[in-house]
Amino acid sequence: KNKETGQAGEPRLQFNNFMVLQDVMEARAKKLSVKMELSQLKEETVQQLEDLFEMHKGNQALNFIVYDVEEKINLQMPSRSQKVKISQELLNEIKGFELDYKLN
């Protein structure tokens, strides 16, 4: 409000913090969910993903979403033992497996 007239003034923005987008992802993302179709669930792929997540150990939760479009099944499976450090490098590696992911 304007002290002299008592009327509301123009809205203003106040910035409290600036972060590089990559830092925001690493600092604010709490969980990585990897989505894979049931047909992609092969022992070799699972082993490769396990190795990948071992290389990117951290404190953020890891979750798997396995789905089957034909049967309309969607199964959420949180990992109890494995946690990861979410980074652009890890996300690029997951894309290399032709898997989708989401960050929470």
Image: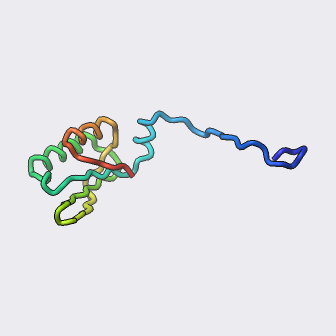
Q: Is residue 73 above or below residue 26?
A: below
x and y percentages locating residue 37 in the rendered image? 18, 54
Is 16 in front, or is 2? 2
> Residue at the left extreme?
43
Q: What residue do we see at 41% from left, 36% from top? A: 22
> Residue at the front extreme?
70
Q: Is residue 90 left or right of residue 47?
A: right
Is 31 in front, or is 59? 31
Q: What residue do we see at 14% from left, 50% from top? A: 46
> Residue at the top extreme?
20
> Residue at the right extreme?
4
Q: What residue do we see at 25% from left, 57% from top? A: 65
The coloring applied to the image is rainbow
x and y percentages locating residue 103 in the rendered image? 36, 49
Q: What residue do we see at 17% from left, 43% from top? A: 51
x and y percentages locating residue 89 in the rendered image? 29, 35
Q: Is residue 27 above or below residue 42?
A: above
x and y percentages locating residue 73 in the rendered image? 21, 65
The quarter of the displayed image where residue 88 is located: top left
Q: Is residue 51 left or right of residue 34?
A: left
Q: How many marks?
A: 0
